[in-house]
Image (spheres, rainbow, N blue to C red):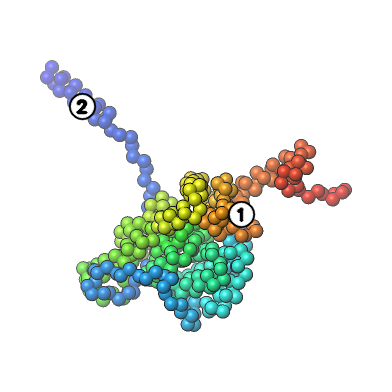
Amino acid sequence: MPNLRACLLLASLGLLAGCGRGPAPAPVEAVQTQTVASPEEGGAVSRAPMTTPPAAPAPVPLPPTAKVADWSPIELASGQAWIDCRLDYREGDGEAVEAPSRANLRHLLEPCRDGDVVRLRYRGKIASDFTALVERVTRVADSLGIDSRVLDLDSTGGQVEDAIRAGDWIGGNRWTIWVREDSVCHSACVFVLAGGDSRRLAGRVGIHRIIRLSSTATSRTELNTELQAVYGTVREYLERNGASPLLADVMKTVPNRSLRLLTGDELALYGLDGNNAAQDDLDRVRLLDKCGDDFMRRRDAWVRAFDERCRAQQGEVHALNACGLQLRRDFGFPDDDCPAESPLAEFNELPEVLELPQAAEAAAGAQAAARATGQGDEAQSAGEPAAPRPPEGG
């Protein structure tokens, strides 16, 4: 009997333990990595000299607009660039930037005044000439009154310090950043991404450790001291631009000969996708005063709807834009009183309107059905264009 009681007691405890278990944890999405052939080509390279003491935090830079314009001749050696006044990149990328001089950039940007938007396509490494290019295009756009600017980016990385300078400039001068489905943004490029007012991502974004090519360290301790100073600068930069400083810690864990590809959830978690949180905070008080409570409620609702309904279109940037434009009509944008502050304001003055394929097909189907039932004239009078009639006898 004692043995029987013991067995029953053990069985009861086992059943209670089983009842206390919670549901099985949700499967964790596997981390995606890829091999990097040469980390120095692109990458996240730091060459900045170390201060004394090395761990001292870097000073906060002056606002980008305080910088004196530099129009000295430079060569665009780190990549290629194009200027386009259209946002539908499926039609091409516009005119090549042969030399980023003031006269040449003004010539290329002059036609963009009608649509009030310029798209700068850049493919190459992040370096000082890229930073100078973005600054110069901004200054010329300002002088021509072109308020909407899109940086259409494809980069495997480059110099950390130049990426931070470019990101700070972008953050102070109303740039939207795209990474198209045929493009990437790897390594130091993510710092440029952090600076954008809004980000539209379809290509892959990847990170890895920062490389100290100018290091004089002879031990891990010395190298770590140098890297701590660099990462301190990176964290401070990410924080002031609305991105998560945790990104710097994740970068440390990825060997520089590998590349960790960030998932959509991670891009949102680290503040690299969609609207920039810091810019949203900065705009809120100004827009409440300028555009009113109703505008802000509709704007916030559009952002939520875009996140919920348009993320399925992440395979292509033009599909993301098309989805956002359809939503914008549903929420009464562009606003009559505040058109320039409305979502996707870069499309306000453009004659073409992107459409999602399914929306275009649905509209065509509705028109075909109306014609088949003899209601084409009513559809036309309601504002729907009637299809051209075939020639007699055709």
Residue drawn at 57 percent across, 45 percent down: 330
Query: Element type at marker 1?
Result: loop
Q: Quadrant of residue 235?
A: bottom left
Q: Which of the marked residues, 2 or 1, is nearer the chain's N terminus? A: 2
Residue drawn at 43 percent across, 77 percent down: 68
In this rendering, the answer to whether 246 lies above or below 377 is below
Task: Look at label 1 and name its amino acid.
Answer: Leu
In this rendering, the answer to whether 26 lies above or below 255 is above
Residue farthest along the left direction in this orientation: 2
Instruction: Tell me whether the residue at label 2 lies in contact with that at label 1, contact meaning CB atoms closer than 8 angstroms.
Output: no
The residue beneath circle 1 is 354
- Counting from the top left corner in percent of width and height, residue 234 is at 33, 65
In this rendering, the answer to whether 216 lies above or below 317 is below
Horizontal placement of 223 versus 237: left or right? left
Give the Cα separation between the discs numbered 2 and 1. Answer: 64 Å
Task: Look at label 2 and name its amino acid.
Answer: Leu
- Counting from the top left corner in percent of width and height, residue 181 is at 52, 58
Residue drawn at 41 percent across, 55 percent down: 281
Q: Quadrant of the N terminus?
A: top left
Which disc, if any, is residue 13? Answer: 2
Dot 2, how many residues are within 10 Å of its Cα: few (below 14), some (14-19), or many (20+)? few
Q: Quadrant of residue 62?
A: bottom left
Q: Between residue 264 and residue 32, name the one nearer to us.
A: 264
- Counting from the top left corner in percent of width and height, residue 277 is at 41, 55
Residue farthest along the bottom direction in this orientation: 73
Residue drawn at 60 percent across, 50 percent down: 356
Pair 2/1: label in front: 1
Q: Between residue 199 and residue 344, name the one nearer to us.
A: 344
